[in-house]
Image (tube, rainbow, N blue to C red):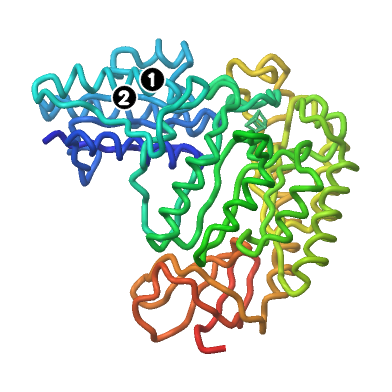
Amino acid sequence: MPGYFIKTFGCQMNISDSERIAASLESCGFVPASRIENADLVIFNTCGVRQSAENRAYTLIHNLKRQAANDKKQIKIVLTGCLANRKDVQRRLKDLVDLFFAIDDFDSFKNWITKNYLKIKNSKLKISAQNGSLNKEEIAYLSIKPKYNNKYQAYVPIMTGCNNFCSYCVVPYARGREISRRTEEIISEIKDLAKNGCKHVMLLGQNVNSYKGENGINFSKLLKKINAIPGKFWISFISSHPKDFDDELIETIAKCKKVCEWVHLPVQAGSDEIIRKMNRHYTQKQYLAKIAKIRKAFKRYKPDAIYSLSSDIIVGFPGETRKQFLESAKVMEKVKYDMVFFGQFSPRPGTAAWKMKDSVSRKEKARRENFLNEILAKTALTNNRKYIGKTVEVLVEKHDGRNYFGKTRTMKNVKIITSRKNLVGKIIKAKIEKASAWNLEGRYGNF
Ligand code: SF4
């Protein structure tokens, strides 16, 4: 039986896509290879958000082909994800890669597999819809029942693609326009997960706020429906766009018991002029007003809960002056984030910002990132200290031989001290005793 290996780069959406690719390959007889060099078929699920991720994929593909040639081994390479549609990438890798396919064109992958592997066995690659037939606006691969990474946490894509065209971003080109999954299919997947003991469902989409299900079901209504599914599990979601993060959604997040007290709302920049050049359609004032509403809603509907706020910020966008950069620092001081994922601007081929002058030096971008990181370290520490003495729910994710590690509903990493056994995959209560900027430490007990 042919062995496959999937190398995934980038975001949770790519991880989730890889789970579906794995399931479809296993449905027709492929088996997972323990190491990339042992596989007959290697899938590279690529990320084009930064040049560094792109370069890592190139290096790995070159090394893998060289190694296979040295070992006189036949190996086939398939490339999907953000880079698959890029003509320059296809030209660069044409002698090394056997198939390029965009993830929304799963049919070409299916046909290629059938042609190259299955004709001999007279078998067929299955893409089995979980819930009836699909209409042509739907993306078939999202209906594949995935091979989840574990039983207690699951990524559930609710939509794919994006219509926003932020000037720095490749997603609308790599994944195409927004397409939402049918509500019925999402609910059915989550019901099954809950029945099988899943404790945390993370809903995925490039912009989940613009979810459009059948019969006018928007993202708030979808959250309410998922919240009503029986069972003890958490619901979280990424990613949101501030322009679409409306009052109905804020109230829903704060009211729904299963929805985690964590909001990831990427601001990307603090300067109105840079936000405009990014084509993001909000101002700093409007963004801060949304944050104030989120705080108010949590205070009203979950007064005892600690909540957390996180964001993405790009430093060194073309033309970003020092004064404009300090507006990002100002937003960080005001919001007091728990976590921020920083990106140093990296021009991406095909995007509007690709044509802008990348005017901020690498050194200055690194300096700006460090500056913001120092603010984050302070606000995250202050926020984390609020947990000391409190008892919080923790989903236990692993045991390193001595201690357990897990996450709170606010996505904080927690080390758990206990002598109990078999806690991985369970939601437990831990009393927090220590806090640093990035971690909490607590004790498991009967509180
Ligand atoms: S909202 Fe903007 S940053 Fe997010 S995926 Fe769409 S284009 Fe990219």
Q: Residue at 59% of width from left, 61% of height from top?
A: 411
Closer to the chain start, of discs 2 and 1, is: 2
Which residue lies most toward the right here? Answer: 285
* Circle 2 residue: 78
Give the residue type at disc 2.
Val
Left or right, 356 with reference to 321: left
What's the distance in space between the residues labelled 2 and 1, CA to CA? Answer: 8 Å
Give the quarter of the image for residue 430.
bottom right
Q: Which mark is residue 234?
A: none
- Residue closest to the eye, 409 or 190: 190
Give the quarter of the figure containing the N terminus: top left
The residue type indicated by label 1 comes to: Phe
**Is 66 left, or right, of 299 in this rendering?**
left
Q: Position of residue 2 (x, y in %)?
A: 14, 33
Of circles 2 and 1, which is in front? 1
Query: How many other residues sit within 10 Å of disc 2, few (<14), some (14-19) or many (≥20)?
Result: some
Which mark is on residue 101?
Answer: 1
Q: Are marks 2 and 1 in contact (CB under 8 Å)?
A: yes
